[in-house]
Amino acid sequence: MRSTDSFTPNVSTRRAMMRSLVGGSLLLPGILSELLSAGSAMASALPSMAGAVDPLLPRAAHFPAKAKRVIFLYMSGGCSHVDSFDYKPKLISDHDKAVKEGKFLKRPNWQFKPRGQSGTYVSELFPHMASVADELCVVNSLKGDHNNHFEATLGIHTGSVTFARPSMGSWVSYGLGTMNQNLPSFVALVPKLPYAGGQVWGSDFLPACHQGVRVIPGNDPIPDMSRRAATAELQQMELGLLRSMNRRHALRRENDLLLAGRIKSFETAAGMQQAAPEAFDLSGESDATLALYGLPRGSTQGFAWQCLVARRLAERGVRFIELIDVGSSDNWDAHGDMNTHAPLAKNVDKPAAALIKDLKLRGMLEDTLVVWTTEFGRTPFVSQPGHAGREHHASCFSSWLAGGGVKPGMTFGKSDEYGIAPAENPVHVHDFHATILALLGLNHEKLTYRHAGRDFRLTDVSGNVVREIIA
Amino acid sequence: MMDGLRMRRDRAGNFFRLLAMALCSCALITPVARGSAEERAVAIAFFELHVRPTLIGRCFSCHGPTAQPPRGNLRLDTRAVLLAARGAGKPALIVPGDPDKSEIVILLRHGIEDVNALPAHRLTADQLVDIETWVRRDAITPDDNLAPSGAPVPHPDLSAARKFWSLRPVQEQPLPAVHLPAWSQNPIDRFVLAKMQEKGVHPVAAADKRTLLRRATFDLTGLPPTPEEIIAFLADTSPDAFAHVIDRLLASPRYGERWGRHWLDVAHYSDTAGEDADFPIPEAARYRDWVIDAFNQDKPYEQFVKEQIVGDLMPARDEADRRQKIIATGYLAMSRRFGVAPEHEMQLTIADTIDTLGRSVLGATLGCARCHDHKFDPFSMRDYYALYGIFESTNYAFPGSEERPFQIGFAPLIDPAKASEVLKPYEASLAAAEADVRRTFDARAKATDAPTYQRLTGEWERAKNHRNDVSHHAPVIEAAYGVSEGTPHDACIQKRGEPGDPGDSIARGFPEVLGGQRLPPDEHGSGRLPLSNWLTDPANPLFARVMVNRIWQYHFGKGIVQTPSDFGNRGKPPTHPELLDFLAKRFVDSGWSIKAMHRLVMTSQAYQLSATDDAANTQADAADDFLWQFRRQRLDAEEIRDAILAVSGNLDLSRPGPHPFPPRDGWHFTQHAAFAAIYPSMHRGVYVMQQRIKRHPFFVLFDGADPNLSTAERSVSVTPLQALFMMNDPFVEEESMAFAGRLRTARDTQDGQIELAYELAYGRPPEADEYSEARAYLAQYVQKLAATNIPAGKRETAALASHLRSIFSSNEFLFVE
């Protein structure tokens, strides 16, 4: 655990550190981040001290990382694996057959085809994703622990289906720190609340600086990011007054890193207030780029906006970017009719494919891990022959990963002939998490945090890295 | 803990603690004689508990007696093979005492550190640390055969375990002799000073009166002192002036709102249930108010805890007392709910009860023994399920859920006869409607063709709607979110924590190491009543220690035991063990009076020290574990909010009415559309509606308690988003404007306004340079405003408000010394 009292630094170096922090120029937050950046002599001389002032400082991974950042595309409600990425010819030929008492097989609503050089199967539900099939590593043998949205949503995000735990993005932020002091390390682009609400990006017992910052499309994407003072100049004056008061207060309190940390936090905030609007301002994007994502100019609607903003945040050093396509209602939860998947797919398909193309174009795909997932799959069977929808199915589902050191054009793991359960190379959610952390250079068994007498980790007491998919 | 080495060291240290615990000797300081019978017994116990299972589970399938042939022709199931030299120049697989030279350890370390290692060689970090520890302690085994011995795993030796510091009986402590007897104002100071002398640090000077008053006022009430209170304290030059201040603050209703909140943290209070739809619980607030009132009344702590466990069964003085005691059991009802039909996940709710009870009252992580015996502390699964049976025999009020969107089993607060008269017909019609739901559901499951299925689905839906309609006609009576007696029975062990995999039935009782009491033969209830007595028994070594440590912690910002809810092996040992026992003894002798403890602690010199730095002390004790200075503390979330409102003049000090939850017949909350609301309030933070699933953004931002967990200690984070809140949030803007208005009403001159601002916010007048800074700032700001569309008549107020926002944002406002 990192806390201000967990180390005993030399008093004089601590003073020097403090002076430089307090003395940092208000409107040049870059100086401080430079001062504290991983490479600087000061930071390496005083890692624990700097960490106490700024727990978001970049930190070394456990072993060489393949990916620097994650863009996590989460489909809320449970996207059907047998209608999207898990091709089951026998499910089609055995349509309406009873697979067990009261369970009748149901064929997919969309046709499957092998795609690209790799021959990765993707259905017509996702034609754009199909066009980048050679970049994808599809996993068809995922399994989770719970058949309920709320619990499964927590599971795929925190590793725990019951008790509140930190979100994966928070763990990554805690493990690696941030690459840009002027933006949060973990951003959640969430137009509508998902199941389990803010717990999905919460830091729980990890320090609050690691929680995801929720961004809502619109004029004020991050709370309190809009200047309240009448003019920028007046705000600068006000912050100048604050700095003067805080410096006076700090003169006789040179040893308190928390005070210094707060002084610095206002500088970072000022930087963030400037940097964040720029990150969300799409006016500089070319028509070609907007067209690639399918985003009308000026629109902040839909997954296209989320994906394009995600790319901009990735470029600007945000460590973990989570996108939730829709909220806890009107989502992939197709109990009544599988065709309700169609408009949802239309919303995400083109932008998700565009994101991969765009990252590749900019040379960023190799160190950006893109993950597409959902909380569970849907039953390959129905209780009544002819029923149009499918139920929740945690025991088998599909996801894909791309970029960030993952083998491209690959399909890993197999489900049984109907897609009911993993048949080869099952990948539990814990394994999935362990693999994502491994790609970031983090050993999931070492990324621990002492809370209430126990060392907690994202993968609880299990998890195996799926080495076969790591390039 | 990022650093693997550090983690390993911790685990190894833990083994040493285990040894120390088992041997009650100073194993930490001088190694125990190698080969003593006791040491050998402990080492074998460690092997049996932590190493043999790994060998069996992870190694022998390829390298054991049944592997045909063994992988690499290597069998690991005898000690002789492990220790034998493996040819010239090759080290043995295990070199007793030296893990770094043991080839197996080297290989397994590699397995953990290298993602590309053979999966079969990838143990968990814990397993590896255990093997390293075992090798370091000479790799002792009972005999040569390492394959399953068939011998039962040895039970931890409880009499040895009871010698661990927190499980020893509380001892009477003589006052230590000190060099500076004049410094001591009360017995606490003797213990504190003796420890400082031992550690080579010296106390700094005492805090000045203004600082002390601000400290004590925030500490006991969570609010800043008023200028009038400051003047009165400065004018009182009598020797007991500060004692009077303490008495005044303890008599204020604001005291219970502050200290009650501490308990609500520990009890993980929430206004919602925490299941998937996060149903609101309007009645929860009664428990909140009960806690606040209990602190204000100085309810003896023993009584305070008993009422929360079993208030519904305790004799009552009168009707009001009876009601209050029922409300007190909200502590148990507050356990988190899970799933869409929480009654199906009751094992998790009971797990939460035991976890919270263990942490809050016993400082014990009992919850760790749910799926396996506690790995570090002497609590077994049998202990866990002995408690579990008590709560499984208890009915928890049901707050509603997606599947059953209405309340069931809330404890009526009106006359019981009348309640039953009103409730009986309702409960009967609800039961009938519920039976109908079940009947139609079961019928549908038997349908064999689609039309029947469709038809029966319709019937089932109608039955549910009817049942919900019935529930909307629930008689409106006053009720509590509490517990009541269920059907008394013992519970079975749930293997690996799975209710579907039952083991032995366990007689209800108390953990062995704490006495192992079982229900008396004449107990015919759930067992909560005897449990409340076992918990509060003066012979229970944890009960008083844990609470006095909490009191100390909230006063000083850090406990004598710095892990206030974990007094076990994984927690930290006390920095002042004698003082802890002294306080525990005093606490019992005072009749469990919490206010008496406040007086004792706050009248000590230790409490009244300044927060001044001292270079020599910092070198010796930078973390101030030995209390040579008072620890500067950031205000917590409630204090930040309440202090801003208090200073602006907008704080409403009355106790608010019920939260404005939507009417009950509109409770159609589901996991798709969970209950979520933020109710604006000008009341104190403790009264603000707190949800489990969608937490209140302000309290999340400033490290408020997470109502999903028992919170022993608020963390203090510093984030740019907090700074942005101060810079740009409408709340701060509005309160700065209100503060400016208050100042302009109270004082005619600009200097007078600044003076009052400093007095209200910082508890001190401004210095000369602060006056001049303010004058220059306000003049310049007003001038700049001329270029904006803010009308001339409002510029002075706007400028002043800007200055005040800087005050709200400043470290001096946000920290108490």
Image (cartoon, grey):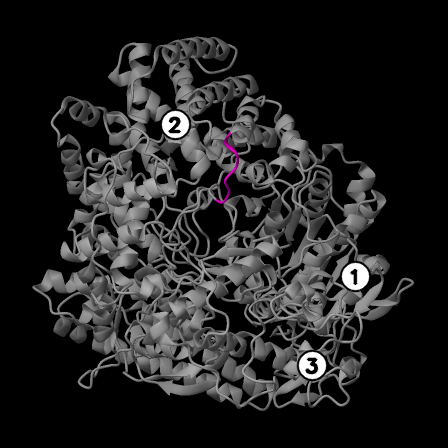
Residue B349 image offset from top left, x and y in percent: 39, 70
> In x, y percent, where is residue B744?
30, 16
Q: Is residue B410 visible?
A: yes
**Percent x, y for residue B174?**
20, 52
Chain of the residue where label 2 is placed in the rendered structure: B
Alpha-carbon neighbours of circle 3 within 10 Å: few (<14), some, or many (≥20)? some
Classify mark 3: helix, strand or loop: helix
> Rounded to the nearest whole Å, what is the CA distance between mark 1 and mark 3?
37 Å
Q: Residue furthest right?
A: A117
Disc 1 packing (10 Å; few <14; some 14–19; many ≥20): some
Question: Is the residue under label 2 in contact with that under label 1 (CB below 8 Å)?
Answer: no
Relative to A316, B274 lies left or right: left
Q: Quadrant of residue B323?
A: bottom left
- Do badges 1 and 3 share one subunit? no
Residue where numbered disc 2 is placed = B812
Q: Residue at x 29, y 65 (%)?
A: B168
Q: Which residues are magenta?
A: A6-11
Vertical position of residue A107 compared to residue B561: above or below: below
Q: Which three-letter amino acid code belongs to the residue tagged 1?
A: Ile
Instruction: Look at label 3 and name its amino acid.
Output: Val
Q: Chain of mark 3?
A: B
Which residue carries the number 3 mark? B81
Do the dots labelled 2 and 3 sit on one chain?
A: yes
Instruction: Give B247 or B147, whichever is nearer the viewer.
Output: B147
Query: Is A303 situated left or right of A112 in this image?
Result: left
Q: Viewer-proximal residue, A88 or B374?
A: B374
Question: For the C terminus of chain B, which image quadrant?
Answer: top left
Q: Mark 1 = which residue?
A: A470
Residue B733 visible to an observer of this rendering: no
Q: Circle 2 sits in a helix, a strand or a loop, which is it?
A: helix
Give the CA distance from mark 1 to mark 2. 52 Å
